[in-house]
Image (cartoon, rainbow, N blue to C red):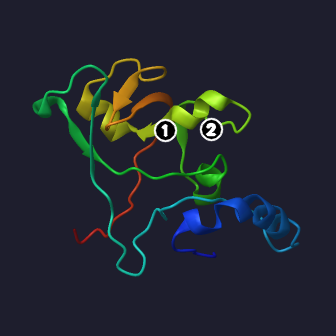
Protein backbone atom coordinates (compact mmCIF):
# COMPACT_ATOMS: atom_id res chain seq x y z
CA UNK A 1 0.00 0.00 0.00
CA UNK A 2 1.31 3.41 -0.96
CA UNK A 3 -0.34 6.46 0.59
CA UNK A 4 0.07 9.93 -0.89
CA UNK A 5 -1.15 13.01 0.91
CA UNK A 6 -2.56 15.72 -1.35
CA UNK A 7 -3.50 13.68 -4.42
CA UNK A 8 -4.36 16.84 -6.35
CA UNK A 9 -0.67 17.74 -6.46
CA UNK A 10 0.16 14.55 -8.39
CA UNK A 11 -3.11 14.14 -10.31
CA UNK A 12 -1.53 14.23 -13.79
CA UNK A 13 0.93 11.48 -12.80
CA UNK A 14 -1.60 8.99 -11.41
CA UNK A 15 -2.45 7.08 -14.59
CA UNK A 16 1.20 6.47 -15.53
CA UNK A 17 1.88 5.47 -11.92
CA UNK A 18 -0.96 2.92 -12.01
CA UNK A 19 0.39 1.42 -15.24
CA UNK A 20 3.88 1.13 -13.76
CA UNK A 21 2.58 -0.49 -10.58
CA UNK A 22 0.49 -3.02 -12.53
CA UNK A 23 3.63 -3.95 -14.49
CA UNK A 24 5.20 -5.25 -11.27
CA UNK A 25 4.65 -9.01 -10.92
CA UNK A 26 3.88 -8.78 -7.20
CA UNK A 27 1.12 -6.16 -7.58
CA UNK A 28 -2.41 -7.51 -7.90
CA UNK A 29 -4.54 -4.39 -7.27
CA UNK A 30 -4.02 -0.68 -7.83
CA UNK A 31 -6.57 1.96 -6.94
CA UNK A 32 -6.58 5.68 -6.42
CA UNK A 33 -8.76 7.40 -3.87
CA UNK A 34 -8.50 10.22 -1.40
CA UNK A 35 -9.45 8.12 1.65
CA UNK A 36 -8.56 4.67 2.89
CA UNK A 37 -11.44 2.62 4.27
CA UNK A 38 -9.52 2.41 7.56
CA UNK A 39 -8.27 5.11 9.93
CA UNK A 40 -4.60 5.94 9.34
CA UNK A 41 -2.18 8.39 10.92
CA UNK A 42 -4.97 10.12 12.84
CA UNK A 43 -6.43 11.46 9.59
CA UNK A 44 -9.69 13.30 10.10
CA UNK A 45 -12.77 12.19 8.19
CA UNK A 46 -14.90 14.74 6.43
CA UNK A 47 -18.58 14.86 7.31
CA UNK A 48 -21.07 16.10 4.75
CA UNK A 49 -24.81 16.57 4.88
CA UNK A 50 -26.58 14.76 2.03
CA UNK A 51 -30.23 15.05 1.11
CA UNK A 52 -32.50 13.99 -1.71
CA UNK A 53 -32.32 16.42 -4.61
CA UNK A 54 -34.99 19.07 -4.14
CA UNK A 55 -35.49 18.35 -0.41
CA UNK A 56 -33.15 20.79 1.34
CA UNK A 57 -34.93 20.61 4.70
CA UNK A 58 -32.29 19.96 7.36
CA UNK A 59 -34.37 17.28 9.08
CA UNK A 60 -34.31 15.23 5.84
CA UNK A 61 -30.51 15.32 5.57
CA UNK A 62 -28.12 12.63 6.74
CA UNK A 63 -24.41 12.84 7.49
CA UNK A 64 -22.02 10.90 5.30
CA UNK A 65 -18.43 10.58 4.20
CA UNK A 66 -17.42 11.77 0.74
CA UNK A 67 -14.49 9.90 -0.80
CA UNK A 68 -13.20 10.39 -4.33
CA UNK A 69 -12.32 6.94 -5.68
CA UNK A 70 -11.60 5.25 -8.98
CA UNK A 71 -13.25 2.24 -10.62
CA UNK A 72 -10.81 -0.21 -9.00
CA UNK A 73 -11.29 0.92 -5.39
CA UNK A 74 -14.10 -1.48 -4.49
CA UNK A 75 -12.24 -4.56 -5.73
CA UNK A 76 -8.96 -3.42 -4.20
CA UNK A 77 -10.50 -3.12 -0.73
CA UNK A 78 -13.03 -5.95 -1.03
CA UNK A 79 -16.06 -3.67 -0.74
CA UNK A 80 -19.14 -5.51 -2.01
CA UNK A 81 -21.32 -3.84 -4.64
CA UNK A 82 -24.88 -5.04 -3.99
CA UNK A 83 -26.90 -2.98 -6.45
CA UNK A 84 -26.23 -1.05 -9.63
CA UNK A 85 -22.74 -0.82 -11.04
CA UNK A 86 -19.25 0.40 -10.38
CA UNK A 87 -17.77 3.54 -11.92
CA UNK A 88 -16.84 3.37 -15.60
CA UNK A 89 -14.08 5.72 -16.78
CA UNK A 90 -15.53 5.52 -20.32
CA UNK A 91 -18.78 7.17 -19.17
CA UNK A 92 -18.46 10.94 -18.90
CA UNK A 93 -21.64 11.06 -16.79
CA UNK A 94 -19.85 9.13 -14.04
CA UNK A 95 -17.97 12.31 -13.13
CA UNK A 96 -21.22 13.21 -11.33
CA UNK A 97 -22.02 9.63 -10.31
CA UNK A 98 -21.90 8.43 -6.73
CA UNK A 99 -21.80 5.06 -5.01
CA UNK A 100 -23.43 4.99 -1.57
CA UNK A 101 -23.85 2.39 1.14
CA UNK A 102 -27.04 0.69 2.38
CA UNK A 103 -27.12 2.87 5.51
CA UNK A 104 -27.34 6.09 3.49
CA UNK A 105 -30.14 4.66 1.34
CA UNK A 106 -32.04 3.70 4.50
CA UNK A 107 -31.47 7.06 6.21
CA UNK A 108 -32.64 9.00 3.15
CA UNK A 109 -35.62 6.66 2.66
CA UNK A 110 -34.79 5.93 -0.97
CA UNK A 111 -36.84 3.03 -2.35
CA UNK A 112 -35.18 2.74 -5.79
CA UNK A 113 -31.66 4.14 -5.40
CA UNK A 114 -30.17 3.60 -8.87
CA UNK A 115 -30.69 6.80 -10.85
CA UNK A 116 -31.87 8.75 -7.77
CA UNK A 117 -30.22 12.11 -7.22
CA UNK A 118 -28.74 13.26 -3.93
CA UNK A 119 -27.13 16.58 -3.09
CA UNK A 120 -24.39 17.87 -0.80
CA UNK A 121 -24.05 21.24 -2.51
CA UNK A 122 -23.49 19.42 -5.81
CA UNK A 123 -26.02 17.02 -7.29
CA UNK A 124 -24.93 13.40 -7.74
CA UNK A 125 -26.67 10.49 -9.49
CA UNK A 126 -26.54 7.19 -7.61
CA UNK A 127 -24.98 4.54 -9.87
CA UNK A 128 -24.28 1.88 -7.25
CA UNK A 129 -24.90 0.74 -3.69
CA UNK A 130 -22.33 -1.06 -1.55
CA UNK A 131 -22.86 -3.17 1.51
CA UNK A 132 -22.14 -1.38 4.77
CA UNK A 133 -18.55 -1.80 5.99
CA UNK A 134 -16.52 -0.64 8.97
CA UNK A 135 -14.24 2.31 8.24
CA UNK A 136 -13.76 3.71 11.73
CA UNK A 137 -12.42 2.20 14.91
CA UNK A 138 -14.93 -0.04 16.68
CA UNK A 139 -14.12 1.94 19.85
CA UNK A 140 -15.97 4.99 18.50
120 w.r.t. 13: above or below: above
Which of the 4 image quadrants contains residue 93? top right
Residue 30 visible within the image: no
User: Which quadrant would the C terminus be assigned to in this image?
Assistant: bottom left
Count of numbered marks: 2
User: Which quadrant would the N terminus be assigned to in this image?
Assistant: bottom right
Q: Residue at x 24, y 34 (%)?
A: 107
State the CA–CA distance, disc 2 to disc 1: 8 Å
Q: Residues within 10 Å of mark 2 (few under 14, many from 20)?
A: many
Q: Residue at x 49, y 38 (%)?
A: 99
Q: Are marks 2 and 1 in contact (CB under 8 Å)?
A: yes
Q: Secondary structure at mark 1?
A: strand
Q: Position of residue 82 (x, y in %)?
A: 52, 35
Residue 38 visible within the image: yes
Q: Nearer the viewer, residue 119 or 108?
A: 119
Q: Position of residue 73 (x, y in %)?
A: 61, 53
Q: Position of residue 118 (x, y in %)?
A: 36, 29
38 w.r.t. 118: above or below: below
86 w.r.t. 118: above or below: below
**Seen from this angle, which residue lies furthest bottom?**
41
Which of the 4 image quadrants contains residue 81? top right
Q: Is residue 138 left or right of residue 70?
A: left
Q: Position of residue 127 (x, y in %)?
A: 53, 29
Q: Is residue 56 left or right of residue 30?
A: left
Q: Which disc is residue 99 wearing? A: 1
Q: Secondary structure at mark 2?
A: loop
Q: Residue at x 62, y 50 (%)?
A: 70
Q: In the rendered image, which residue does mark 2 sit on?
A: 87
Q: Earlier in the sequence, mark 2 or mark 1?
A: 2
Amino acid sequence: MIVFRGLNAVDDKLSPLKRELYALPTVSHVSIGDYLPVPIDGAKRNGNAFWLDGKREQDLATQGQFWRIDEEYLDTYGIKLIEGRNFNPEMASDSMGIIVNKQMIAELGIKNPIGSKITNGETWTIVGVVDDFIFESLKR
